[in-house]
Image (spheres, rainbow, N blue to C red):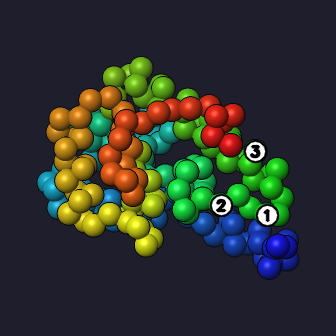
Amino acid sequence: MADVHNPATRSKNMRAIGTQNTAIEKRLAALLTEAGFDYTVQDATLPGRPDFVLEAWRCILFTHGCFWHHHDCYLFKVPETRTEFWLQKIGKNVARDARDIAHLKAQGWRVMVVWECALRGKRKLSDAALRERLEEWICGGEGCAQIDTQGIAALAVTSHSDRV
């Protein structure tokens, strides 16, 4: 199927996609605040400019869009137009994510990725379920983890070639 927009309109739409203070970040911020956690946002001094830094717990939280970071869920679909371009662009995001997480781990941080599908869409987790998983990991979790529609699991950082 061809793109329904001309190149100028598509370019304008893509430029309008925000990278900070997104709806999924706002939802996660509200849950962290309700749970009583202190955090800072978008810390540019750390690799990957983490969405949330919980210094007291030595935790980093990223909110990853399922399309932009290639999550294997119902929200990710390989574009039918300019497929090679998009796969390369998304592949670079995945590689950068892996590099940033490795750097953060080396600095002694625990890293959590909260996927977009856990925060919005028809299969999203309830606020109570999401808050419970966040509290469980922040207060007592080991290593790196991720939350998606299936719940909480260890975070396996893979290379781009393993994912696409």
**Kind of residue indicated by mark 2:** Lys
Q: Quadrant of residue 119?
A: bottom left
Distance in Å between CA atoms under marks 1 and 2:
9 Å
Q: Position of residue 46 (x, y in %)?
A: 44, 34
Question: Who is closer to the viewer here, 69 or 125?
Answer: 125
Residue at 42% across / 28% down in the picture? 104
- Side of 38 relative to 107 (left or right): left
- Side of 153 relative to 94 (left or right): left
Question: Who is closer to the viewer here, 27 or 121?
Answer: 121
Q: Position of residue 93 (x, y in %)?
A: 63, 43
- Side of 158 relative to 129 (left or right): right
**Kind of residue indicated by mark 1:** Glu
Residue at 80% across / 55% down in the picture? 83
Q: Position of residue 145 (x, y in %)?
A: 36, 38
Of marks 3 and 1, the one in the foreground? 1
- Side of 93 relative to 127 (left or right): right
Residue at 74% across / 48% down in the picture? 87
Tell me whether the residue at label 3 lies in contact with that at label 1, contact meaning CB atoms closer than 8 angstroms.
Answer: no
Tell me whether the residue at label 1 lies in contact with that at label 2, contact meaning CB atoms closer than 8 angstroms.
Answer: no
Q: Position of residue 142 (x, y in %)?
A: 26, 29
What residue is disc 3 on?
88
Which residue sits furthest top? 106
What residue is disc 1 on?
80
**Kind of residue indicated by mark 3:** Gln
Distance in Å between CA atoms under marks 2 and 3:
14 Å
Q: Earlier in the sequence, mark 2 or mark 3?
A: 2
The quarter in which the N terminus is drawn is: bottom right
Question: Who is closer to the viewer here, 51 or 130?
Answer: 130
So how many labels did they put on this image? 3
- Labelled disc at residue 77: 2
The quarter in which the C terminus is drawn is: top right
